[in-house]
Amino acid sequence: MKAIVLTQYGSPDDLELKDIETPTPNDDEVLVKVQATSVNDWDWCLVRGSPFYIRLLCGWRKPNIQIPGAEVAGRVTAVGPNVTQFQPEDAVYGDISECGFGGFAEYVCVPETALALMPERMAFTEAAAIPHAAMLAVQGLMDVGQLQPGQKLLINGAGGGVGTLGVQIARAIGVKDVTGVDRASKFALMRSVGFTHTIDYTQTDFTTGQERYDLILDTKTNRSPFKYLQVLNPGGTYVTVGGLTPRLFQVLLFEPMIRWFTQKTVRLVNLQPNKDLAYVNELFAAGQLKPAIDGPYHLSEVPRLIQYFGAGQHQGKVIITLNPHRTHP
Ligand SMILES: NC(=O)c1ccc[n+]([C@@H]2O[C@H](COP(=O)([O-])OP(=O)(O)OC[C@H]3O[C@@H](n4cnc5c(N)ncnc54)[C@H](OP(=O)(O)O)[C@@H]3O)[C@@H](O)[C@H]2O)c1
């Protein structure tokens, strides 16, 4: 099979498109013929071996991950003897970052626990855009942020995967006032998916403005947590899904003190992959969730696309299709 192979940390240019052996599923795995996959922050970090915790997780000197790619959508072609939920021909999707990655390939073996059936009418290119970013958004907004109908929400880093899905999840909950912060070139897309207000972070620092929010969801934490408190309503919550590592440590460190002295909350989301796919399937079936897709592109373009993602030039989710003539089950 064809696969994008990682042999060393460095840059996306070090990745190679190679012919390698097709894997065989073990007892608890299914073999998925990948139809679509996507680029994530995981891939950008994995190919560079940075930040440092990537090397703690994936090998200090050399990556022990052979094929990057954290999200897949495709068709089951074989199942191990202990698999109970799936059978050949099922259309499935999931976040495979906790089971060895491998999405940038024609086939991948995945434990059945990391997959869900795709709902009817969901295209493979849509399915590959959903698991990782939608779980971060659902868990950030609902589980940790406890978002309620009628609240005022701001999403920082709004033009990427989490932001463009998060705003739709918020609106499905009954939130009408959603501000998105990103660069102005992404405003048209952001408005099309439901943001009611937009702020260009290259021109305006929202933490020094007059507006106040009940919940802030951040994909790009790059300030001290105390800056965000200034623009939270009394009792408000700041939730980060990612950003600069020292800033994330500050959120963890100061969380109890901030709660005690200000009655406001700062929290970091610890992603539980695939936990809420059934809920997301319901939103999709009800027409309340449609991923914003950048692409689809070809597998051979993955090195360029990871660079493009790392430079922040993408809008929504960067999608790769392995079958350009057939995007729908
Ligand atoms: N918590 C967990 O367990 C967990 C697990 C995996 C991943 N993550 C994290 O989850 C996040 C994924 O978010 P995503 O997929 O939505 O990322 P994304 O697609 O890269 O979107 C982020 C957006 O933020 C914009 N941006 C860059 N700098 C900004 C700034 N200073 N202020 C405002 N916006 C800015 C980017 O655009 P420009 O660059 O063009 O400006 C981009 O449009 C990442 O931070 C990742 O590390 C968390």
Image: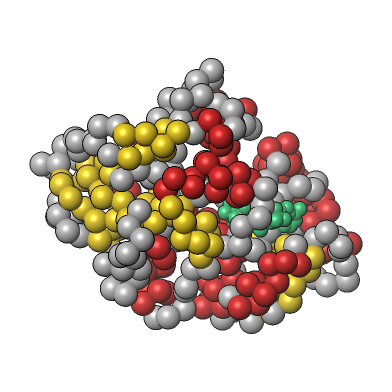
Left or right: where 85 falls relative to 271? left
Left or right: where 5 falls relative to 157? left
The percent coordinates of residue 21 (x first, y second) are 25, 32
The percent coordinates of residue 103 (x first, y second) are 38, 45
Q: How is this picture coloured?
A: secondary structure
- The C terminus: image quadrant: bottom left
Q: Is residue 118 visible?
A: yes
Residue that extends furthest to the top in the rendered view of this protein: 61
Q: Is residue 150 visible?
A: no
Q: Nearer the viewer, residue 130 or 48?
A: 48
Residue 86 location, quadrant = bottom left
Left or right: where 183 falls relative to 298? right
Q: At x 24% / y 56%, what residue is drawn? A: 75
Q: At x 83% / y 59%, what residue is drawn? A: 202
- The N terminus: image quadrant: top left
Q: At x 49% / y 45%, what residue is drawn? A: 302
Q: At x 39% / y 56%, what residue is drawn? A: 321
Left or right: where 34 falls relative to 153? left
